[in-house]
Image: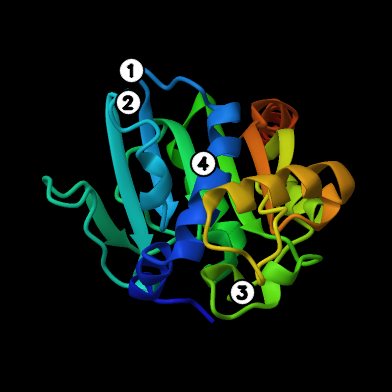
Amino acid sequence: MSIDATAVADFYATRRGVMAARQVRSRLMAMWPDLTGQDLLGIGYPAPYLRLWREQAARCIVITPAQMGRTHWPTARLNASATAEEDALPLADVSIDRVLIIHGLEHAETARRMLREAWRVLRPEGRMIVVVPNRASLWAYLERTPFGHGQPYSAAQLGRLLAGAMFRVDRRDMALLMPPVGLGSALRTADIAERIGRRALPQLGGLVIAEAVKDIAGLIPLAEGRRRLVLVSSI
């Protein structure tokens, strides 16, 4: 069942939400330190994270799946967000350099279709980051956060899903190694817990992060095979 975008926004207005966004942003920045001049698309509810690159990117837009409701981003500025069906993004083919999916795939009615649309709009040299709840983590079962809703994935399950949608995973990471309960009010407490968890039990991180590229090579044998079939059938 999909979570409403308003509920996600409310979470990020809380102390726990601020701490979670801080930890996730640090992992995303490590993967994409500079997107100057790039066209960036966020799918799901990426607003707390696009601020990392908003001033760098040539174009930075948000698509919220229709089942999550409407959003306005960025706040107090000209709206750069739209609501669309997850399998019908209002974007041209190969028009985007980077795609970030967060609070999106786990709520998709058909995850494979969402990924295929991301594949369609992504340029051949483009990259995509997908962030999903880790099914082995307590975060995936705490319904007071948006990470406790929708379909969680293991790293292996996410990898297979991406491969089936013709993506190749280049890098993997985890975020939210801190526990989802019992945190103090200081960001410093969360930072310490995150560092300890990353060293001790990284597989139990609250979020699985995968950076992937389009598997263009997989298309070539199929296209050649189809051409051969056409030639044979026409003789």
Amino acid type at circle 2 is Ala
The numbered dot on residue 192 is none
Q: Position of residue 31 (x, y in %)?
A: 60, 28
Label 3: element kind: helix
Mark 2 and mark 4 lie on one chain; the one further toward the N terminus is 4
Please name which of the two marks, 2 or 4, marks the residue nearer to the observer: 4
Mark 3 and mark 2 lie on one chain; the one further toward the N terminus is 2
Please name which of the two marks, 4 or 1, marks the residue nearer to the observer: 4
The numbered dot on residue 57 is 2
Report whether 113 appears left or right of 45: right
Label 1: element kind: loop
Q: Are marks 1 and 2 in contact (CB under 8 Å)?
A: yes
The numbered dot on residue 25 is 4
Q: Is residue 84 above or below residue 73?
A: below
Q: Is residue 80 above or below residue 71?
A: above
Give neighbour class at mark 3: few <14, some 14-19, many 20+ (Cα, 10 Å): many
Q: From this viewpoint, is residue 176 visible? A: yes
Q: Are marks 4 and 3 in contact (CB under 8 Å)?
A: no
Look at mark 1 in the image and give the residue it sits on. Answer: 37
Q: CA distance from mark 1 to mark 2?
A: 5 Å
Mark 4 and mark 3 lie on one chain; the one further toward the N terminus is 4
Mark 1 and mark 2 lie on one chain; the one further toward the N terminus is 1
Q: Residue furthest right?
A: 200
Give the camera-side residue of 130 and 200: 200
- Residue at the spot x=37%, y=30% of the render? 53
Report whether 102 appears left or right of 11: right
Mark 4 and mark 1 lie on one chain; the one further toward the N terminus is 4
Report whether 13 appears left or right of 230: left
Report whether 37 appears left or right of 183: left
Q: Position of residue 138 (x, y in %)?
A: 74, 71
Look at mark 3 in the image and give the residue it sits on. Answer: 148
Q: CA distance from mark 3 to mark 2?
A: 31 Å
